Image (spheres, helix red, strand yellow):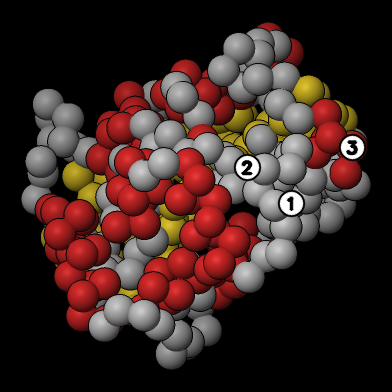
Amino acid sequence: MGKCVRNIKSLSLQANSAKTVKTDTLTSHTKDSAKLPVLYAHYTDGQLALEALRHHLGETTGLEVLEAGCGSASHLKLSHCRVTGIDISPYQLERNSQLAERICADLHTFENEQWNHAFDLIVCWDVIEHLERPKIVLEKFFKWVKPTGKVILAYPNPQIWKGVVTKYSPYFVHQLFYRVASGTPFSASKRDQGPFRTVFADDIKLRPLLQLAERHGFKPEFFVSYESYQNKFVKRWLPHAVVDGLNRFFLGELKSTLDVSATDFIIIFSADTLK
């Protein structure tokens, strides 16, 4: 794997004591060892990370947006945009009031030539970790987005204790922990209610993801992580040092790049204009 270089700098955001900020050169480890510099920040709360994303995106009025795996609601709450939603569940689509167009289909198999270079923004939020073959879907995103557009991926880090336990433990364990940690009084077995089965295919690990994006002429322009409520919940019962130690172990080489509590990512990919 390529070497990661870390320096401490500040984001072009208002000062916020709830974040630690790093500038990292993340190496995709291709044959020419091309480096993909990206400003990286870690937040202690997902809402702060979401605010940073909104700040980075700026004005979104008039954009053609695709919500891939849109579910019943949008995290970004994009206003004055035309939002197309695609989801495998007709029930989730019916409940999503933000959509101008609803497509009930499987992202793995759906094809539409009219979508090529059609979207200013493609948002895939907490979806990619559930896909059996995310590489196929990601390649479609890079094809569907306009040359000047952006692809936003938000998903849990598969290379940290939460990701490893979720991937390798029985599904009912995932369901039970989700209910207890979130305090959500619903049954995860009900139709269209999470948590959904999580695959964590190798393609969405950070370095393979960067490699894939680079092969298609894309690079990360924005990269933040944050600490999930599940990680905070476990810290109520186990010493912080134990939880952090487990995370360092599973992060492996990435421990020199990512914050030890980087349980979830938000990444924006855009076309590499230097290519």
Label 3 residue SS: helix
Residue 74: which numbered mark, if any?
1
Mark positioned earlier in the residue sequence (1 or 2): 1
Using the image as rendered, state which of residue 83 and residue 73 is in the foreground: 73
Using the image as rendered, state which of residue 113 and residue 227 is in the foreground: 227
Label 2 residue SS: strand
Judged left or right of residue 163, residue 172 is right
The answer, for residue 23, to whether it is visible in the render is: yes
Quarter of the image that includes the N terminus: top left
Give the residue number, with chain letter if any, for mark 2: 123
Residue positioned 76% across, 30% down in the render: 89
Give the residue type at disc 1: Ser
Residue positioned 63% across, 64% down in the render: 54
The quadrant in which residue 25 appears is: bottom left
Tag 3: Cα neighbours inside 10 Å, few (<14), some, or many (≥20)? few
Label 1 residue SS: loop
Q: Position of residue 112 (x, y in %)?
A: 70, 11
Give the residue number, with chain letter if any, for mark 3: 94
Q: CA distance from mark 3 to mark 2?
A: 19 Å
Judged left or right of residue 95, residue 194 is left
